[in-house]
Image (tube, helix red, strand yellow):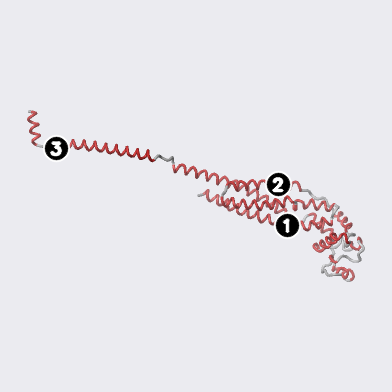
Amino acid sequence: MAQEDAVRCLRCLLYALNLLFWLMSVCVLGVAAWIRDTLNTVLTLTAHTRLEEAAVLTYSPAVHPVIICVCCLLIIVAMVGYCGTLRSNLLLLSWYFCSLLVIFCVELASAVWTYDEPSVQRADMISLKFRMPNYGLQRYQWLTHTWDSFQMQFKCCGVIYFTDWLEMTEMEWPPDSCCTNQYPGCARHAHHHDLSDLHQEGCGPKIYSFIRGTKQLQVLRFLGVSIGVAQILAMALTLTLLWALYCGRQFQELDSEVTSGPPEDSTSIAATNGTTTDASKSGCGRMTKGRTETSAAEAQLKDPQVEIEWLNAAG
């Protein structure tokens, strides 16, 4: 009874861990996709600079294709583990344990291989200014779109201040993406009437903060550590469940052999019973015959005529 309760408890814990694997893997994929979109924008603005190298070093573990493939594989493995736990199948549980072990080793190796502290300074932000003169040119439409997208998303303007657009380009006012309330011609109106309608913070510090690490990156790191701890716990529980199921089946086989015993031949049993019966009958017949003869002799002794003949013969 205690063994059945322990197996039931192990199965419930594995159910919960597999569900946790599904949720955390989906969260990792979602956050990685979110970060990847912003990372592409930052890499476009910081191309051929030290900021680009620092961004790659910081976010490569989070958006590396190996990590994405591992999360997708973990979802499939969790399904197999759920089925193996539900059916108490030793083969599926063994495959589940081996898969978790391989995935854990790949995650650990990838984290060690890609980990590196980026060396970036605030002075490196000045290099972003050399990407500004190409803004608005026909053959650099992709760069124009990237600048507008980043300034609208991070609510910034220029590199250090919005005057960088006037300094580095031939523009008389900043782009409309610098406006707090955007509409066609808003930057021109703000430049001549109210500068407070423009974003006052530069994009350089925003990019520097992004490279040093964002909340999304911290969430990914937390999820990665949580998945690793959950994998270790799941492997330990799977080994325990495998041992319990294997020992339980061995005990059941031994019990069945003991209770059933070796089979006997029905013919020999019948012959043995027949011999015993015949012997019993012959024994009972001899006892009855002896008793009959004894009773006849006693009857003769009690007869008076027989007694007189016996006395005459004695005299």
Q: Residue at x 54, y 44 (%)?
A: 247
Q: Which residue is mark 3?
A: 299
Is 267 rendered above or below residue 144?
Answer: above
Q: Quick one: label 3, few (<14), some, or many (20+) residues within 10 Å?
A: few
Give me the disc on residue 31: 1
For badge 3, the amino acid type reads: Ala
How many numbered dots are placed on residues in this image? 3
| Element class at badge 1 | helix
Distance in Å between CA atoms under marks 2 and 3: 108 Å
| Element class at badge 3 | helix
* Residue at the top extreme of this rendering: 315
Q: Residue at x 73, y 47 (%)?
A: 110
State the image coordinates of residue 82 (x, y, percent, origin top left): 60, 52
* Residue at the front extreme of this rendering: 267
Q: Earlier in the sequence, mark 2 or mark 3?
A: 2
| Element class at badge 2 | helix
For badge 1, the amino acid type reads: Val
Q: Earlier in the sequence, mark 1 or mark 3?
A: 1
For badge 2, the amino acid type reads: Val
Q: Which residue is mark 2?
A: 106
Is 170 rendered above or below residue 302?
Answer: below
Cβ atoms at labels 1 and 3 below 8 Å apart: no
Q: Quick one: label 2, few (<14), some, or many (20+) residues within 10 Å?
A: some
Q: Earlier in the sequence, mark 2 or mark 1?
A: 1
Question: Quadrant of residue 204 in the image?
Answer: bottom right
Distance in Å between CA atoms under marks 2 and 1: 20 Å
Pick whichever, 314 or 82, lies toward us.
82
Q: Quick one: label 1, few (<14), some, or many (20+) residues within 10 Å?
A: some
State the image coordinates of residue 2 (x, y, percent, origin top left): 52, 49
Distance in Å between CA atoms under marks 1 and 3: 117 Å
State the image coordinates of residue 233 (x, y, percent, origin top left): 63, 49
